[in-house]
Image (cartoon, rainbow, N blue to C red):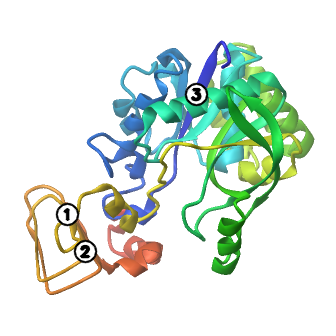
Amino acid sequence: MAKTPYIVIIAGGKGERFWPQSRTACPKHLLPVVGDKPLLAQTIDRVKPIAPSKNIFVITSAAQADAVRKVCKGIPAANIVVEPVGRDTAAAVGLAAAVVGARDPEGIFAVLPADHVIHDAKTYQANLQAAFAAAAKAPVMVTIGIPPTEPATGFGYIHRGSVWKKVARREVYAVKRFVEKPELKVAKKYLKSGDYLWNAGMFIWSVPVVEKAFAAHAPELDAGLAKIRAALAAGDALPPVLKKLYPKLVKISVDYALLEKSDNVVVLPATFDWDDVGAWPAVARHFKPDEAGNVSRGSVIVEDGSDNIVFSEGKHVVTVLGADDLVVVHTADATLVMPKSRAQDIKKLLPRLAALKNGRRYL
C-alpha cells in the first residue's frame, strides 16, 4: 500500500429517491438509512484504519456543509471542502487532486462515494489497500468493480480484460471499456459472461496520473483546475478561490471526461458485500422482516398486509391494513405512499412539490 494514503469522500447529490426523509440539505448520506449512524459516518469509520483523519477529505455542497461538519467528527475543519455549486464528478475529482496535491504532489488518493452500505469492513479495507498498492506500482487508474449478483439495469458496467498484474495476492485486470446502464437482455448477457463488473464509483490513483489524464482528455476543464492548483500553491485560501473559479468549470462526469478515454484503467474485483441502496425497496435487504415480509421502523402497525416497507419518524403511528407491496414513509412534514414497483418514479413528484406554495420547504 502507498506510504501516505489519502481518502476523498464525495458527499453531494440530492438523494431524491429517498424523499421524504431525504432533502436537498439532508440527503441519503446524512441519514441512518441502514444502521444507527448516517451513511457518511459509516464510510468514515470504514476508512479510518487505512488513513489518518488528517488525510481524509470530504467534498460536499454549500447546502449540506453544516450538516456534514456535524457528522464528520474528528476530521479537520480544513478537510471539509465545500463546492459553491455542483459541477458533476469530474470537477470534484479534479478538486480532490488539487487539494491532495497541495499537501503531497505525488500523493495517492481514493475517491469514494459517501452513501454505500458495506457490512464487511475488514475485507473492504483489504481490497482498498490492494487498490492503493496497484496505484503505487504503476501509473494506472484503479477502480474497484462489484461482481454482479443479478442482471441490474440501474448500474454502469466495467468490461474487464486479461490479468494486468497480481497485487497483494489479488488479480487486477485491465479494463476494456465502460458500459452505460444496459437493457435487461444485455444485462443478462453481462451476468452470464462473468467478464463484467458493476461500476461503483470507487477510484484510486495518484495526483500526477489524474492531472495527466485531465490534461490529455479534458483540456478545457483542466485549464480551470490549473488555476485552482496555482492558487493553492500560492497559499491562497480555498473558499474564495472556489467561489471565483469553480462555477466556471465544465460540468461533466469523471466517467465521460477521463475513464472512458483512458487506456491505463485497471479494475480490482471486490470481495466485500456492497449495496448502493439506490431506492426505498433496497432498504428492506438490510432489515429483518416480520413473518409476512413487512419491514418497519418507528411506530408502525401492519395488519393483513405483506411485503410492505413502512417507516415513521417521531411518535406518529402509521398503520397499514389489507395492503401489500407498499412503501409508506412518514416524516414531520410529509408522507409518501406508493407501490414498491414505482420507487424509481419519486422524481416525478418533485416538480409538483416545488410548485406548491412554499413548496421548496419539502425539497
Position above or below: 280 against 231: below
Picture residue at 24% right of the left edge, 58% below the top: 288
Q: What is the spatial separation of the Cα atoms under label 1 and label 2, in whole angstroms? A: 8 Å
Q: Residue 8's spot in the image, x, y percent?
A: 58, 31
Q: Residues within 10 Å of mark 3 (few under 14, many from 20)?
A: many
Q: Residue 289's spot in the image, x, y percent?
A: 22, 64
Camera sees residue 228:
no
- Between disc 2 and disc 3, whose residue precedes? 3
Picture residue at 12% right of the left edge, 55% below the top: 314
In what element is the residue under mark 1?
strand
Q: Is residue 27 left or right of residue 299?
A: right
Q: Is residue 101 left or right of residue 76?
A: right
Q: Residue 114's spot in the image, x, y percent?
A: 49, 42
**Front disc: 2 or 3:** 2
In what element is the residue under mark 2?
loop
Position above or below: 273 against 307: above
Residue type beneath disc 2 = Asn
Q: What is the spatial separation of the Cα atoms under label 2 and label 3, in whole angstroms? A: 38 Å
Picture residue at 76% right of the left edge, 22% below the top: 136
Residue type beneath disc 1 = Ser
Q: Which residue is mark 3?
A: 7
Q: Is residue 34 left or right of residue 127?
A: left
Residue situated in front as seen by the camera: 293 or 13: 293
Q: Residue 193's spot in the image, x, y percent?
A: 72, 65
Looking at this view, name the residue that lies furthest to the right: 216
Q: Are marks 1 and 2 in contact (CB under 8 Å)?
A: yes
Q: Which residue is mark 2?
A: 308
Residue situated in front as seen by the camera: 200 or 32: 200
Q: Which residue is mark 1?
A: 296
In what element is the residue under mark 3?
strand
